[in-house]
Image (cartoon, rainbow, N blue to C red):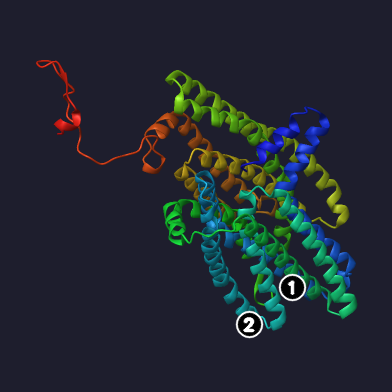
Amino acid sequence: MAGIGVKLNRIYRKRSLTARLYGFAYSTVITIAPMFVVIGAVLTAEILLKFPLASYMRRELFADTLLYTFIFSLLTVSPLNAVLSKYVSDIFFEEKFEDVMPCFYVGLAMTVALGSLLGIPFCVHEYLVGEVAIYYVFTGYWSYMSLVLVFYSMIYMSIIKNYGKISFFFIISMLFSVLLSLLLHYIVGVEPTYALLFSMAAGFTMIATLEYSQIRSYFRMNSGEYKAVLKKIKHYWKMIFINFLYTLGLYIHNFVFWTGELQNVLVKSFVTAQPYDMATCLAMFTNISATIIFITNVELHFRDRYRHYFEMVLGGRGHDIDNSRDRLFRQMGEEIFTVIRLQFIISVVVFLLCMVLLPLFGFAGIIMLIYPGLCVGYFILFVMYSEILFLYYFNDLNGALFTTAIFCLGTFVGSVISSHLPEYWYGLGLILGAFAGFTTAYTRLQWIEIHLNEMVFCPKDAEHDLVERDMRPRPGAVVYDRSHSTWVDPEETEE
């Protein structure tokens, strides 16, 4: 999020309704616009390609391939996402820009290796057991690996503050995908579902290529310090599990229901639960604005209090440090409850609109029974994520790891239980897991408020010491010799 606040402050400085609307739109562009661009491109192409005329089997195969592509590409990138962001941020602070590309290449190699480890066995199974055509399997794998590269490169694009470029790359690439799909179908004669899958894979490749070229234009030098990246990954191993467990928790309830009564198996490879998956998508979109609200408020208000506290730590009196700490946590509490208040209003309005309008477009039955519970779950989940980011601000990796572990485990266990309940209770697993994670993070933040000075002045990690540590014998206790009226150098009387 670094760097967003500068732009938002310029926008909101005008203090007008237009400025607030523009600020909200800007926040939307840098957070969720790429996702909506992809969804819009797929829906537009399906209309133009007359998807309903294609066979049901082909349409379902395309939908499941795209679903797996997005879910597992996010899971593939998630382990290294946070730790590499932390390392590159440290590089920027130290102005060692030549170390960025070694970090990029090491992370890329590890991410591609993990992606291949997950993708190749599945594709082999899809071809041999599911008897899907080899060209279709290859295109699905191409789409998956391209999206892995897109999500991975977005880490570095965000760090260099090219948020607008990310959205621009998605827009032009998805426009290219739609046009290419029309060309393949109406000119070349390719079957519509495969034409769109091929075009989406090409579009994802185009985004990844544009992102890489942008990164290379910023960082032309390479120090060759590849081992330093591995050491940093080892040092911040907790961040690997924090981000992975959070991302896994977003989908683990879906995985549970994929094995239940709603299970749908396609070509003996793709396992889904369409009603639950659709309800999940709707619930996520209902609450997605919480991310925008949080980023806007934190960048505008919390960061100033955070910076002021550490300015007092470096040069203020004890009384000033305590006052700035109290103001910091009051501001943090206000931001959390501001997100809750505003998102509650937005969620209620969107929920009512969905309950009234969605049945007119064919969304009814079991989908609308599951949807309310998942809405509540995602409402709590996004607030919990705000707390995790606050834990990152205070470098409390133990608290963040414990929070995501409780969230992921609670969601899994709760979903297993709720899968045996009536349909309108299916979302209970996500509610319980998110609430457990929210409570854990909130309790941890209260603990930090009490022990913040201790954490800052007496850290267990030597890397974060305010005063450099040194290993040597303890100096002697005598500093002044009264008999000779002379000062004594303590290092000369070491004990």
Query: Helix, strand, or loop for circle 1?
Result: helix
Is residue 53 positioned above or below 240 on the image? below
Q: Which residue is mark 2?
A: 129
Q: Position of residue 470 (x, y in %)?
A: 29, 40
The quadrant in which the N terminus is found is top right
Left or right: 453 with respect to 46?
left
How far is disc 1 from disc 2 in space, using C-alphas?
A: 15 Å
Seen as rendered, the residue at the extreme left is 483
Q: Position of residue 397 (x, y in %)?
A: 47, 45
Left or right: 106 with respect to 162?
left
Q: Which residue is mark 1?
A: 61
Badge 2: few (under 14), some or many (20 or more) residues near its Cα, within 10 Å? few
Is residue 460 positioned above or below 305 on the image? below
Q: Quadrant of residue 166?
A: bottom right
Q: Nearer the viewer, residue 484 or 87?
A: 484
Q: Position of residue 226 (x, y in %)?
A: 46, 61
The disc labelled 1 sits on which kind of residue? Leu
Q: Residue at x 67, y 58 (%)?
A: 214
The disc labelled 2 sits on which kind of residue? Val
Q: Which mark is residue 131?
A: none
The quadrant in which the C terminus is found is top left
Q: Position of residue 48 (x, y in %)?
A: 89, 67
Badge 1: few (under 14), some or many (20 or more) residues near its Cα, within 10 Å? some
